[in-house]
Image (spheres, rainbow, N blue to C red):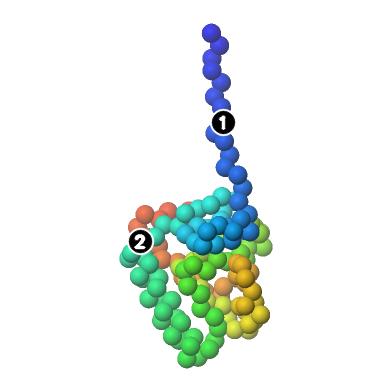
């Protein structure tokens, strides 16, 4: 008898940022890291905390108009070292002079790196994955 050779596990197919947009709901609930879908870890408490921070930031921006506020479902494709990466922070802010009305009207991922990112860390989030 010859020893059985182990078959390496199949590598999942690479997913592109455009593939993510073509998913139902534009891939809501997922980020894209190293060509692989990463399901977002959400819970009621972290969603509420993120929502409150974004709400207060949005209120301030409505009054002072320093820039654009984006909620948790917004996808950002703004990583020059990894153009295939898409992240969805719990909230984000981009200064008005860095993001035009035309960019705002465009479909797809936001391609401008936010000036401020809100990320609520849940107890079961791993630092290495959040970083």
Density class for disc 1 (Cα within 10 Å; few <14, some 14-19, many ≥20) is few
Cβ atoms at labels 1 and 2 below 8 Å apart = no
User: Which residue in the rendered view is the most extreme toward the left?
Assistant: 45
Q: Which mark is residue 45?
A: none
Residue occupying the point 47% across, 73% down: 71
User: Which residue in the rendered view is the most extreme toward the front?
Assistant: 24
| Mark count | 2
Res 98 quadrant in image? bottom right
Q: Secondary structure at mark 1?
A: loop
Q: Is residue 105 visible?
A: yes
Residue occupying the point 56% across, 31% down: 8
Q: Which mark is residue 8?
A: 1
Which residue in the structure is indicated by mark 2? 43
How far is mark 1 from mark 2, CA to CA?
35 Å
Q: Is residue 31 left or right of residue 16?
A: left
Comes first in the chain, label 1 or label 2: 1
Looking at the picture, does residue 26 appear above or below residue 13? Answer: below
Q: Secondary structure at mark 2?
A: loop
Q: Is residue 98 visible?
A: no
- Give the x, y percent position of residue 84: 63, 57
Residue occupying the point 47% across, 91% down: 63
- Give the x, y percent position of residue 67: 55, 83
Q: Is residue 81 left or right of residue 121?
A: right
User: Which residue in the rendered view is the most extreme toward the bottom?
Assistant: 63
Front position in the image: 130 or 65: 65
Res 86 quadrant in image? bottom right
Density class for disc 2 (Cα within 10 Å; few <14, some 14-19, many ≥20) is few
- Give the x, y percent position of residue 114: 57, 73
- Give the x, y percent position of residue 28: 49, 61
Looking at the picture, does residue 123 appear above or below residue 1? Answer: below
Residue occupying the point 63% across, 59% down: 18
């Amino acid at each position: 008898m010859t020893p059985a050779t182990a078959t390496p596990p199949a590598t999942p197919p690479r997913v592109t940022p455009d593939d993510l947009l073509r998913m139902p709901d534009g891939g809501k609930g997922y980020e894209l890291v190293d060509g692989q879908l990463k399901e977002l870890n959400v819970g009621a408490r972290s969603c509420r905390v993120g929502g409150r921070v974004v709400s207060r930031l949005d209120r301030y921006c409505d009054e002072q108009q320093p820039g654009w506020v984006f909620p948790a479902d917004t996808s950002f494709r703004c990583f020059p070292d990894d153009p295939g990466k898409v992240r969805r922070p719990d909230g984000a802010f981009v200064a008005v002079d860095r993001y035009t009305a035309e960019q705002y009207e465009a479909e797809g991922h936001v391609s401008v790196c936010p000036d401020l990112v809100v990320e609520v860390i849940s107890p079961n989030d791993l630092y290495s994955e959040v970083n």
